[in-house]
Image (cartoon, rainbow, N blue to C red):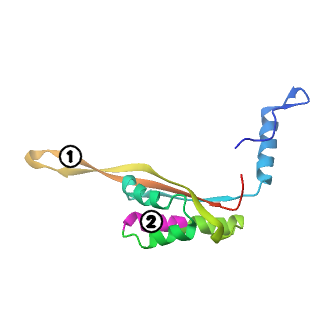
């Protein structure tokens, strides 16, 4: 995502604050073609969620919703909600049409772990790690060229 604003103007170097102000103004003038939604601290193992995420990555939004709706996994229910939120963000905040959207990026990152003791024989204990996930979905307008 290279900017057209140059740090050098008329042979003189711009101050950093002026350069960043110009760069931000230029970026704000561009039409928005991408919206995102994030769900944090979801009580689901990231490795189990990633298989569902890989099934919808790069797909059309309507097709991705169908895949998630008929998947029996818990991860599919959670990802479905986050995807619906991303679609709503695209429609309401940026004025994009839902039928033109694709799932451009989906990430399921690891969150903190809850550690619980698991009693074992002979007075010992093991640690159960109950994993959490952070889910981030970005939807993009497929008609917009970059």
Q: Closer to us: mark 2 or mark 1?
A: 2
The prevailing secondary structure element of the residues shown in magenta is helix
Residue 26 location, x and y as percent?
80, 47
Tell me the number on the disc at residue 126: 1
Residue 139 location, x and y as percent?
60, 60
Q: Is residue 80 left or right of residue 95?
A: left
Residue 40 location, x and y as percent?
48, 56
- Asked if residue 43 is positioned above or below residue 113 in the image, the reply reads below
Task: Name which residue lies at 76% across and 41% down.
Answer: 3
Q: Is residue 123 left or right of residue 18?
A: left
Residue 144 location, x and y as percent?
71, 59
Q: Is residue 120 left or right of residue 58?
A: left
- For the residue carrying disc 2, how many other residues have a C-alpha within 10 Å: few (<14), some (14-19), or many (20+)? some
Tell me how far mark 2 sits from mark 1, CA to CA. Answer: 30 Å
- Asked if residue 9 is positioned above or below residue 47 in the image, the reply reads above
The local secondary structure at tag 2 comes to helix
Tell me the number on the disc at residue 118: none
Looking at the rendering, the stretch of residues picked out in magenta corresponds to 73-83
Question: What residue is disc 2 on?
Answer: 78
Residue 8: name its quadrant. top right
- Asked if residue 143 is positioned above or below residue 111 in the image, the reply reads below
Which residue occupies the foreground of this view, 138 or 64?
A: 64
Tally the marks. 2
Residue 29 magenta: no
Residue at the limit of the structure toward the left, as seen here: 122
């Amino acid at each position: 995502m290279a900017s057209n604003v140059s740090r050098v103007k008329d042979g003189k170097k711009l101050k950093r604050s002026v350069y960043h102000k110009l760069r931000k103004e230029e970026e704000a003038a561009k039409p928005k073609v991408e919206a995102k939604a994030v769900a944090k601290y979801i009580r689901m193992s990231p490795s189990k969620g990633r298989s569902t995420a890989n099934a919808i990555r790069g797909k059309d939004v309507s097709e991705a919703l169908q895949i998630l709706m008929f998947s029996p996994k818990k991860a599919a229910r959670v990802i479905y909600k986050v995807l619906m939120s991303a679609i709503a963000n695209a429609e309401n905040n940026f004025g994009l049409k839902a039928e033109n959207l694709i799932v451009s990026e989906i990430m399921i990152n690891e969150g903190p772990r809850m550690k619980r003791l698991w009693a074992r024989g002979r007075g010992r204990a093991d640690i159960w790690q109950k994993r959490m996930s952070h889910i981030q979905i970005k939807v993009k307008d497929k008609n917009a060229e970059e």
